[in-house]
Amino acid sequence: MLTLTDNASAIVNEITTQPGLAESAGLRITTEDAPEPAFAISAAMQGEPGDQVVEQGGATVYLDSAAAELLDDKVLDAAVDPSGKVEFALALQG
């Protein structure tokens, strides 16, 4: 199952605990139809039917079934660049 670094958990929490969002809000990772695996990350009020739910460090991430399979042995990391943009990265679990 996908795991999150402490940085990723903190950033996901910051994104999904904005005023007006539901307690079930989280990030949703979906696969995009492309020759090479590509992922789309978006804020979601809740998961979709069939999504795998990853809860770690108070953060919630929803994965569609294809993303869950492709990310099963991965670690999600996140950082904020100097301009304030969030960047996500994947690594193999160690």
Image: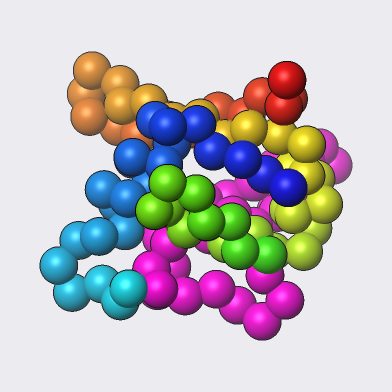
The answer to which of 72 and 67 lies nearer the viewer is 72
Name which quarter of the figure residue 24 lies in. Answer: bottom left
Residue 72 left/right relative to 63: right
Q: Kindly identify the residue that appears in the image at 42 percent across and 32 percent down.
A: 6
Q: Residue furthest bottom?
A: 49
Q: Is residue 54 above or below residue 5?
A: below
Q: Which residues are magenta?
A: 24-51
Q: Kindly identify the residue that appears in the image at 39 percent across and 30 percent down.
A: 7
Residue 93 left/right relative to 40: right
Q: How is the image coloured?
A: rainbow
Q: Kindly identify the residue that appears in the image at 73 percent across and 53 percent down.
A: 67
Q: Where does the image place residue 25, in percent across and percent down from the top left?
A: 38, 68
Residue 20 visible to an observer of this rendering: yes
Q: Is residue 12 above or below residue 5?
A: below
Quadrant location of the C terminus?
top right
The answer to which of 58 and 62 lies nearer the viewer is 58
Q: Where does the image place residue 59, in percent across and percent down from the top left?
A: 42, 53
Name which quarter of the figure residue 2 lies in. Answer: top right
Would you say residue 50 sits in the magenta stretch? yes
Q: Where does the image place residue 53, in percent across and percent down from the top left?
A: 61, 63
Q: Is residue 69 above or below residue 75?
A: below
Residue 42 visible to an observer of this rendering: no
Total label count? Answer: 0
Would you say residue 69 sits in the magenta stretch? no
